[in-house]
């Protein structure tokens, strides 16, 4: 996922929801390779303006943790080292979601699982 999640909205709540959805879409232990623009508040392409959530390195790492990821590698690219108008961050993360004990869960990040309306551990 490269330069997508922070550019779908200017709402931090929507950004968090997107990261949680990505975490749920991965198999437990699944890997995510991603890139994010840091500090961007949006950009314009061919006259169309696109929003962005202004992220910081530490804030993004906190968002990853809250969404259920363990970040394994981070590389920050300063402005001017790439084609983007702002600094960027590449991150490699692993979903820490636990396997469903029964195989019938709609698991969310963390240790708990939802199964037919009841919580199991």
Image (cartoon, rainbow, N blue to C red):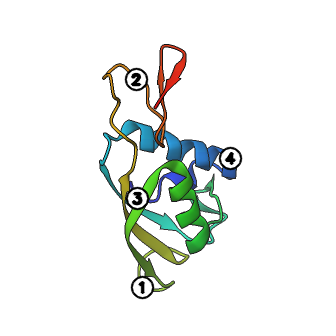
Residue displayed at 52% across by 43% down: 20
As measured in the structure, the alpha-carbon distance from the residue carrying label 4 to the one carrying label 1 is 30 Å
> Which circle, 4 or 1, is nearer the viewer?
4
Q: Considering depth in this image, is 111 or 79 the residue closer to the camera? A: 111
Residue displayed at 35% across by 19% down: 104
Q: Earlier in the sequence, mark 4 or mark 1?
A: 4
As measured in the structure, the alpha-carbon distance from the residue carrying label 4 to the one carrying label 2 is 25 Å
Can you give x and y, in whole percent of width and height, for residue 107 in the image? 44, 31
Can you give x and y, in whole percent of width and height, for residue 80 in the image? 47, 86
> Which circle, 4 or 2, is nearer the viewer?
2
Tell me the SS state at disc 2.
loop
Whether 110 is drawn above or below 85: the answer is above
Residue displayed at 43% across by 44% down: 23
Residue displayed at 37% across by 41% down: 98
Whether 102 is drawn above or below 35: the answer is above
Tell me the SS state at disc 3.
loop
Can you give x and y, in whole percent of width and height, for residue 111 in the image? 46, 40
As measured in the structure, the alpha-carbon distance from the residue carrying label 3 to the one carrying label 1 is 16 Å
Q: Considering depth in this image, is 121 or 55 the residue closer to the camera? A: 121
Whether 102 is drawn above or below 38: the answer is above
33 left or right, relative to 67:
left
Residue tagged by mark 3? 2
Residue tagged by mark 4? 13
């Amino acid at each position: 996922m490269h330069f997508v999640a922070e550019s779908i909205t200017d709402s931090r709540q929507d950004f968090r929801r997107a990261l949680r959805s990505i975490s749920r879409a991965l198999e437990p232990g699944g890997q995510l390779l991603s890139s994010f623009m840091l500090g961007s508040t949006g950009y314009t392409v061919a006259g169309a303006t696109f929003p962005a959530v202004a992220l910081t390195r530490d804030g993004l790492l906190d968002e990853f943790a809250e969404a259920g990821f363990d970040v394994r590698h981070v590389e920050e690219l300063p402005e001017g080292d790439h084609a983007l108008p702002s600094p960027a961050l590449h991150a490699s993360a692993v979903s820490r979601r636990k396997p469903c004990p029964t195989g019938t869960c709609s698991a969310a990040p963390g240790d708990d699982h939802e199964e037919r309306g009841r919580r199991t551990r």
